[in-house]
Image (cartoon, grey):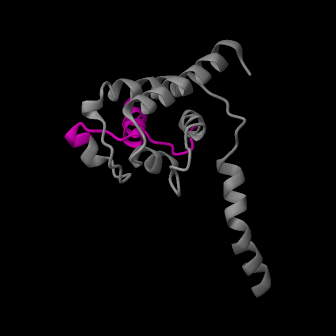
Amino acid sequence: MKNALIILFLLIPYISFSQSEDRNLTFDSLDFKIIQQASLILQDSSVWNKNDDRECEDDIENKSYSLFCALFKASMDVTGEYVHRRAGMQQVRFTLEKYEDGRVTAHRLMDWNNHSNTTFEEVKMVLEEALEVVQTQLKHGK
């Protein structure tokens, strides 16, 4: 029994990784609206918070948003809830990976947002590219 628990414990990261990193995403109109709203929230560099701590209450109060907190607020605005692995959120993460270039160690959205090489223009580009992927699937299916 003890060995079975140890094996299960060792397999947990692989089990959760495969579930949370499914790249065969299916979007709905809410995914489009969330990413679109996040892009509107990050309307210009003056509202971008380059020091994300994944705690969004202060970002919302200060109207200064990291990429993660803009997506969090957009999700709350559009759906009334935040779902961490929602398809649209995952698409932003997957799009960001194309530009990661060694900037991520643990939390993609936070690490990339906070990295000294990341620019506001790149943040907007990632949101726009993710939005295009969602829009294309919604128009044409998979």
Residue 13 visible (yes or no): yes
Looking at the rendering, the stretch of residues picked out in magenta corresponds to 60-86
The image quadrant that residue 98 belongs to is top right
From the viewer's perspective, is residue 28 above or below residue 1? above
Q: Quadrant of the N terminus?
A: bottom right
Where is residue 111? Give x, y as percent: 45, 51
Residue at the far left: name it: 62
Q: Position of residue 4 (x, y in %)?
A: 79, 80
Task: Tell me the residue at 46%/28% (across/down).
Answer: 34
- Residue 1: tell me if it is visible: no
Q: Is residue 74 magenta?
A: yes
> Which quadrant does the C terminus fall into?
top right
Relative to 131, is 74 on the left or the right? left
Does the magenta-highlighted stretch encompass residue 31? no
Indicate the quadrant where residue 90 lies: top right
Asked if residue 136 lies left or right of residue 114, the reply is: right
